[in-house]
């Protein structure tokens, strides 16, 4: 069980870092892919950057919740 929990945390952190880096460097391009109007592009890019920096914490929270639920917690 220790190995499974460690693997879940490690893979979640690695994936979170990869997604954060991808999102940070390609956020303007992603906004163009969804055809964001130019008048809200700057605000949209800022919002996306803030959201992207929270991805790793969201992923770790979900792993923790899954582990606690599997152990019979809350």
Image (cartoon, helix red, strand yellow):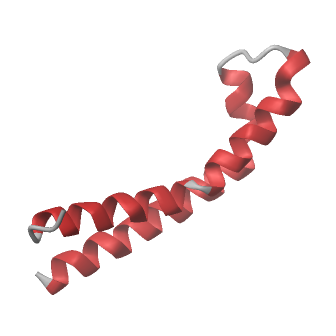
Note whether 10 is above or below 42 in the view shown: below
From the top left corner, tell me how far across and down residue 46 is, in percent.
80, 41
Residue found at x 55% / y 64%: 17
Residue found at x 78% / y 36%: 45
From the top left corner, tell me how far across and down residue 50 is, in percent.
71, 49
Q: Quadrant of the N terminus?
A: bottom left
Farthest residue toward the bottom? 2
- Relative to 52, 62 lies left or right: left
Judging depth in this view, the residue of 60 and 30 nearest the camera is: 60
Residue found at x 22% / y 61%: 66
From the top left corner, tell me how far across and down residue 67 is, in percent.
21, 68
Note whether 50 is above or below 69 in the view shown: above
- Relative to 17, 52 lies left or right: right
Determine the image quadrant of residue 63: bottom left
Note whether 59 is above or below 67 in the view shown: above
Q: Quadrant of the C terminus?
A: bottom left
Residue found at x 15% / y 68%: 73
- Relative to 68, 39 lies left or right: right
From the top left corner, tell me how far across and down residue 35 is, in percent.
71, 15
| Number of numbered discs on residues | 0
């Amino acid at each position: 069980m220790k190995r499974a929990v460690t693997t879940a945390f490690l893979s979640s952190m690695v994936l979170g870092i990869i997604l954060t880096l991808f999102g940070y460097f390609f956020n303007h391009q992603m906004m163009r892919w969804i055809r964001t109007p130019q008048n809200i592009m700057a605000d949209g890019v800022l919002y996306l950057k803030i959201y992207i920096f929270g991805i790793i914490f969201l992923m770790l929270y979900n792993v923790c919740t899954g582990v606690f639920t599997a152990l019979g917690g809350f």
